[in-house]
Amino acid sequence: MPEQTYLEAIRGGLHEEMSHDPSVYLFGEDVALGGPFGVTAGLAEAFGKNRVVNTPISEGTVMGLAIGAATAGLRPVVEIMFIDFITLAMDQLVNHAAKLHYMSGGQLKIPLTVRVQCGISGTMGAHHSQSLESWLAHVPGLKVVMASNPADAKGLLKAAIRDDNPVVFIEHRGLYWTRGQVPEGEYLVPIGKAVVAREGEDLTIVATAKMLAATLEAAEELSSNGISVEVIDPRTLSPLDVETIVSSVKKTSRLIIVHEAVEKDGIGAEIATQVQQEAFYYLDSPIARVAAPFAPVPASPALEKCFVPGKTEIIRAVRRALNR
Amino acid sequence: MLPKLPRETLLDLCRRMFVIRHFEESLVPLHDKGVFGGHYHLYIGQEATGVPALSCLGGDDYLFTTHRNHGHLLARGADPKKLCAEILGRVDGYNKGKGGSFHTVVPSLGFLHTSAVVAGIIPLATGTAYAAKALKNGRITVCLFGDGALEEGAAPEALNLASLWKLPVLFLCENNGKYGAGRATSAAQSSTMAAFPLTDLPKAYKVPAQQIDGLDSGTVHATISQAVEKIRRGEGPQFVEAQTVRWPGSETNWPSVAQRTDSSLAWDVSGVPEKVREWYRSCDPLLIFIRELVDAKQATKEEIADIERKVKAEIADAVEFAVASPYPKPEEAAKEYFA
Amino acid sequence: MREIAYYEAKFEALNEIMAADPTVHLINGTFLSLSPHRHVYQELANKYRDRVMSPPISELGFCGLATGAAMAGLRPIVDISTGSFIFEGWPQVANEAANAFSMSGGQTRVPVVFHLFHGLRGGGAAQHSASPQAMLWNNPGLEIVLPSSPRDVKGLLKTAVASDNPTIFVDHVQLLDVKGDVPENDSPIPFGLAHVKRKGSDVTVIATSYMVQRCLQVAERLASERISAEVVDPRTLVPFDMATLMTSVEKTGRVVIVDETHQSCGVAAEIAARIVESGFDKLKAPLRRVSTLDVPVSYSPPLEDYIGPREDRIIEAIRAVLR
Amino acid sequence: MVTKRENPTELVPLLRTMWLIRAFEEKVSALYAMREIRGLLHLGIGQEAVAVGTCSLLRTDDYVFGGHRSHGHAIAKGADINRLMAEIAGRATGYCAGKGGSMHIVALDAGFVTATGVVGGTIPLALGAAFAAKEKSKGQVAVVFFGDGAGQAGAFHESLNIASLWRLPVIFVCENNGYAEFTPLSSHTLIERLARHAQTYKIPSNTVDGNDLLEVREAMTKAVQHARTGKGPAFVECLTHRLRGHYEGDPAKYRELSELAEWKEKDPIARFTRELKHRKVVADKDIAAIESEARKLTEQAAQFALASPWPAPGEVASQVTA
């Protein structure tokens, strides 16, 4: 299996799906030039500028255009760049993409993939660093996926493109240059399935995107102190695979949720609520969340660094939960 | 041509242009060395627009700018120390490190909010103009944005409102795309804007609009001072598109300085790397301005070199100050999200 | 005490605010949706012609305009009217208004109020029934207010306008005709103070907005079955009064949260997560939430009725936590 | 105007469709008054000529997008009025199984792709359908109907720009009925004719009397041909008037009675009928028959709708995702 960066895995997934299905089109600012980070580099050369389409800076309309094209038989992939800019397309995404299938009583299908990159990397301040996944997970009719490693990035993206629903595919910019094994060719990660990234006995941690690596590091360090942590990557935030999490909690009796978005009404709140309902009598300690503080993302590197939860915060939360 | 202004004022404009140029050229190595991270955008090549234009404003007026804001702040008299510290994310920065290059705000100079979402400020600028009109405080608002901002729906929405309600706002579109990469020169503004000329957009809303050469400080000053006067008289919004030629250093993904500016380049560009030489020879607004000063006998080459020397020292101090300034305390990250 | 309708209390507040502070401007809409009480607003519009503006259908434009005006010294109240339309103005509300104070390192204040109607209103279907407050709760920098009674709407609206922060004032059409006590010359209600709407001892029912009224009716019904429900209304999501909630939870040990946002990552999820985090040991049974089902809002009346936090679902949840 | 070069035999069906829309909407209004229909209803009575003038020139596989006032557009495009009425009444047999309602009509079998409750919301969507049509190269076009209120929305401008740049086969049909909700256009913009915006973005445009069916047809013929032959977008502004309020129940106090009376004089159905009579294409008895046939069909549609079952509550969670 070849080793690739997360970014290359996404590009590979796009390339394969565009070869596989002529109705897959790519829209976005500068996508034909490769985009700001080179994710789509080479695709315009391979598939033509008809299918890899540069758009004006008109996120709302480009989103609407893609939705319309989806109703008319294409399978568009829209790149919105920074997830912060999804604010500009909220009406089309929330009021239209998410609802057209339902409102039409099932007549319309919206096979749309929205690519965005989120998260903190490189002191870009409050308009280029947010993690807004829980907004989207709150909207019925949207599916929301987040990959934490190159293989999942490819497999989830391919599954997203083939899905007949609007899927928001959230990339973490801070993972773009991380490397990992990526299966070649036809490799799909099913939407709606979590994965146990590390098995353990004493406590369950659910972590998303870039927080997974921090959590695995923490788990490794804790294991040398005799604490065995099970780590779960939900991979899909909506629909959430709560069964995998609940069965882990029934084994470990303790749960911590780690994400980079602010804590308030983040995906952690949803997981906590569902787990307490399903596994209340198994829980030996309160469910804890480790997440960003309730503030816009600051620009200064010093502030930014402590804004993101890391290994230290995770270990502290684990010790508190286990009282040791 | 030079603005019709007293000599002292012209020399002050010259100084401000030097401040912008040397400030921004100093940022590039800082970024390359990793002293600060993140995206940043430079104003180099547009000094002859921002400096004379903003000199037409009153002290109380409001300004809104975008990700490309350093030049506007400095033209308006921002302290290079505090601006540099902000860009470096330090506690002595204008926003105590919370805004950074994208979002530097200096209310005392009229900059209430700086947005990195293209066109995000255009509705906001109509808002301060609305407030000024309601409060009858005589302030006007200047909204500074690039040509790309007009592609966003927020722009026409705001132009319509400003026109409908006769709001005291100057839309100053700095089109740095003239002859730039990937931009056509005559048939259309670009592959992403069908309206051509760009001034058709405001004109549709009955906002008086004109296109000017943004490299010509005299034209900029004359046009903007007239526009400002009309706005102050209560005639409603005005739109000016100032065209400049994109600085070659901004055509790479991250800004790069192939040639550090020195006033001597105004008369001799033979030492400039060939691929960027033409820009410095004929499109560099700072060098054009210097030549005009000397040709008009408003200053000698030596006087100009002296101004430049002082500015360079000031900028070196500013960088030193910013680098030495501590980072904010981590716990500040979760504070001040509410008034 | 004087009893008046919710819409009357709201207009008393607007009238008093407009009279007291000339920097308050009303931008767009009617603040009463399409209800029969719209004429009340007209009186206000006639009285303050220069301060009551009717912009085009440009949510993006006028949400930004109001935000900018707030930065420059006005205190605008924007009526987004139907909550679903906030998505058009979202960039200005969520990216600009919410962040400006923090990004400026505390320099730029944005005293703007965004007013909207949320929730199931009868035939609103999927594009006129949104309850965007849960998403906004995930967005630092916005204060979020949800009144549920005539007295609260008056007191909270005054505080919202006086606040130096951008405030989302989330209203509900079904509340407009609700009657309640509003003393003459009552004072503003501070944010961050939950209110116990009904005392009880067996179960804590935490409810927001119109659901407070529904839960009070449910509590009344259950009282005849000797179930004593305490109904607590947080009134503001940001800031949030955890202490009052926990006092009730400590007393009853059983919690049902009733809220009209969609279930996943909804308002109830966050309240539940907090109680589980800080009050887990006090809970005698798993906490239950009753939210709007995770589907777009349906048009057909029986479908619309079905997806909301219906009375029978609330009762079932209360019985479940009492088992 | 007698100068229009139209074949008389093609004209009678147009009158029939206009009457079908009128009768249908009057029935909807009556059912609303009887509380048999709930929700927020927007009727286009008085604007039938735009819908019929446009859709009569389209193929079934052309894409049509509407707004919140789109019953007429769907009928003109060939939607089944029984299923349409059932949808508006929220019944299981409706086009959208009761999930969409009056503002969210979808009749895919007729090529009516979707309507929207958000002013201007479908304009970008139509662009997308046009993009797909262009790629499929079957000569399909997309048409989007919107009101003058949408002309001040950002999405409208972004859409004109992109349609122009990419030469998309989309026809923007602006039904300028003079009021955005409750406000006259002049309070919303200084621009009198929204076609002006098309000029800004270099899109060919035309402003016509939207209550004159033949004038609408003439402008649309050119616009549709322009788009169908790959020349890019076109814009037609139709000046018209809704004879009802913004929504059913709107007392419409913002409108002078004299204005209403003036527009009633210009009722598109009456005008077209006069024209046909003048050309001796129809006689009084034919006209009466057309009207009564339309009323009969809509009566049947109402009966069908009201006899239809409500959707089962269990359906509420179905069709959230495909």
Image (cartoon, coloured by chain):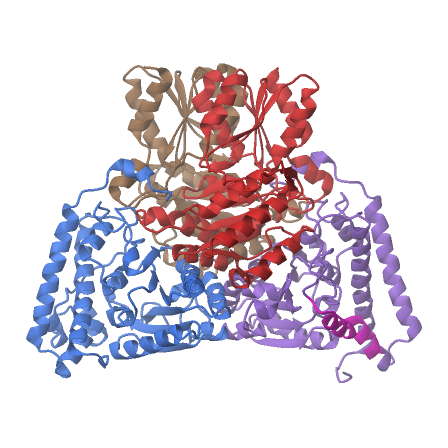
The residue located at (67%, 64%) in the rendering is: D254
Residue C307, compared with residue D200, is above or below; it is above
For the point 27% across and 17% down, the residue is A224
Nearer to us in this view, C245 or A198: C245
Asked whether residue D263 is drawn in magenta, I would say yes
Of helix, strand and loop, which mostly describes the magenta segment? Answer: helix
Color used for chain B?
Answer: blue
In the rendered structure, the answer to whether residue C134 lies left or right of residue D322 reads left
Q: Quadrant of the C terminus of chain C?
A: top right
Q: Quadrant of the N terminus of chain C?
A: top right
Residue that lies at the very extreme toward the left in this rendered image: B302
Question: Among all residues in the image, which is located at the extreme bottom?
Answer: D3
Q: Which chain is brown?
A: A
Residue D274, how many percent across, how many down? 83, 78
Residue B211 in magenta stretch:
no
- The image position of residue C244, as x and y in percent, is 48, 26
Q: Colour of chain C?
A: red
Left or right: residue D246 compared with residue B202: right
Residue numbers of the magenta segment: D255-276
**Residue C103 x/y as whole percent:** 33, 48
Q: Where is residue D298, by image quadrant?
A: bottom right
Q: Is residue D125 left or right of residue D68?
A: left
- In the rendered image, what is the letter of the chain coloured purple? D
Image coordinates of residue A89 in percent, x first then y, are: 49, 52
